[in-house]
Amino acid sequence: QVQLVESGGGLVHPGGSLRLSCAASGTGFYFATMGWYRQTPGKQRELVASITNCGSANYADSVKGRFTISRDNAKNTLYLQMKNLNPENTAVYYCNSQPTPLAWGQGTRVTVSA
């Protein structure tokens, strides 16, 4: 069974940067398309970015040019580099397989505030 552990969130000022990490245990990470999702109170979880096992990435329009998803298959780790953050990026960020998520981890909270 795959377990996902997100980290790297925190408080950042507008215009700042953060790098999120997702450590995946268990087998199957190498073959999976993985994604970063985020959720804010009262809203459904949304897909922010995804990356295939070969490294082909896709992004939501709202983060294109500012967020970069990457993965290290040897380390079973997924990353999300976020730059030029704004308050609308405040959310709890989760990683999971895409399009069919597995069990969700605890997420990592990102707060963008002056």
Image (cartoon, helix red, strand yellow):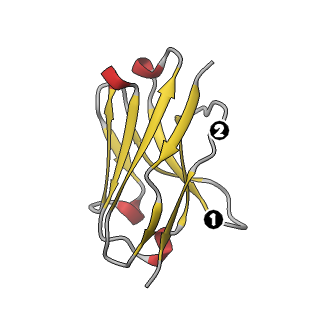
87, above or below 59, in the image: below
* Residue drawn at the location 40% of the way across and 25% of the way down: 76
Residue 26: give x, y in percent of width and height. Answer: 53, 17
Q: Quadrant of the N terminus?
A: top right
* Left or right, residue 47 beside residue 104: left
The reply to whether the C-beta atoms of the residues labelled 1 and 2 are less than 8 Å apart is no
Relative depth, front residue between 8 and 64 = 8
Residue that mark 1 sits on: 40
Residue 74 image label: none
Secondary structure under badge 2? loop
Label whose residue precedes the other's in the sequence (1 or 2): 1
* Residue drawn at the location 30% of the way across and 71% of the way down: 84
Q: Quadrant of the C terminus?
A: bottom left
Relative depth, front residue between 71 and 43 = 71
Relative depth, front residue between 86 and 64 = 86
* Residue drawn at the location 68% of the way across and 64% of the way down: 43
Q: Amino acid at mark 1?
A: Thr
* Total count of labels: 2
- Find the residue positioned furthest to the bottom: 114
For the residue carrying disc 1, how many other residues have a C-alpha within 10 Å: few (<14), some (14-19), or many (20+)? Answer: some
Mark 1–mark 2 distance (CA, rounded to whole Å):
15 Å
64, above or below 89, in the image: above
Residue 13: give x, y in percent of width and height. Answer: 38, 77
- Find the residue positioned furthest to the right: 42
Residue 101: give x, y in percent of width and height. Answer: 61, 34
* Residue drawn at the location 29% of the way across and 62% of the way down: 66
* Left or right, residue 59 beside residue 99: left
Residue that mark 2 sits on: 104
Secondary structure under badge 1? loop
Q: Amino acid at mark 2?
A: Trp
For the residue carrying disc 2, how many other residues have a C-alpha within 10 Å: few (<14), some (14-19), or many (20+)? Answer: some
15, above or below 72, in the image: below
